[in-house]
Amino acid sequence: MQAREVTAGLRAAMDDVRRTVAVLAARVREAHAARVWLPLGYSGWASYCGAEFGISRAQAYRLLDVARVLAAIHEAVTAGPGMSRTRDTNTGPAGAALDYGLSQRALIAVSSRVDTVAELITRRLAALVHSGLQALDESTVRAVVRQAVRDVRTVPPPPPADPSADPTLAALRRVDELAAGTHAIGELMLEVAPAYLSDTAATDVLALFCEEIGEPLDHGLAARRYAMSGDRRALHGTVL
């Protein structure tokens, strides 16, 4: 019983930290938009953060990255059809970000690909709306956002521009290319059978689709699992 209570307390503390990240990002956006350093006599954002909060230049700009990513996510969530309920329940500068449960580390990791994250969220939410399979309540939207961030974080990197002639490296590169192609197929499978569906439910949805595109069903399901997890072990025995 005590272990369960400690675990519950730890979970609550983690949730508090994530909410704090979202609130901090909102305040950073407000301060930067208002150029608050000027009336205080500082030359710029970095010098203001260093003097007022004791953080480095790099940390100051990472805060801006976090704020920018959360703003883009919020815009992607609220821009699509059927999002009125989300808009109604998430007002003010902190907005819907309070409910996403995203860590600062995760947000910084996708800051250079924020357009990809936003586009992925928009597509998946639109697919859910059009499918009519599930109501877009806050928990569903949160799951879609977190999965999109995770997918972008775990997508395989592009191959090098000048690949090595070493046969071992060439073989590894072919595996990487196959994994990258399979990840793209997995994204397509997720458009048809979203992540909230179990493998069994996804099988019913994907059977005809895989037949139409000439993809074995077991490969399609493996690609879908890989796109959700980023773990290549999902491809063992099928694609790899």
Image (cartoon, grey):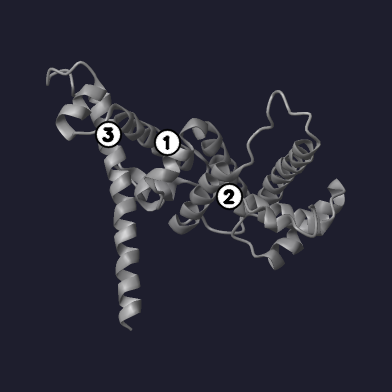
Residue under numbered circle 1: 69
Of 154 and 85, the residue lying toward us:
154
The answer to whether 36 is drawn above or below residue 83 in the figure is above
What residue is shown at x 46% (from left), y 53% (from top)? 142
Marker disc for residue 28 = 3
Mark positioned earlier in the residue sequence (2 or 1): 1
Q: Which amino acid does label 2 sit on?
A: Val
- At 35% from the left edge and 71% from the top edge, which residue is drawn? 7
Say which amino acid is labelled 1: Val
Q: Badge 1 local density, few (<14 within 10 Å), some, or many (20+)?
A: many
Q: Earlier in the sequence, mark 2 or mark 3?
A: 3
Q: Which of label 2 and label 1 is nearer to you?
A: 1
Residue 29 position within the rendered picture, expressed as x and y whole percent measured from the top left = 29, 32
Residue type for callout 3: Val
In the displayed structure, 161 sits above or below 130; it is above
Circle 2 SS class: helix
Q: Distance between the residues labelled 1 and 3?
A: 12 Å
What residue is pinned by disc 2? Answer: 129
Q: Which residue is drawn at 69% across and 58% down?
A: 234
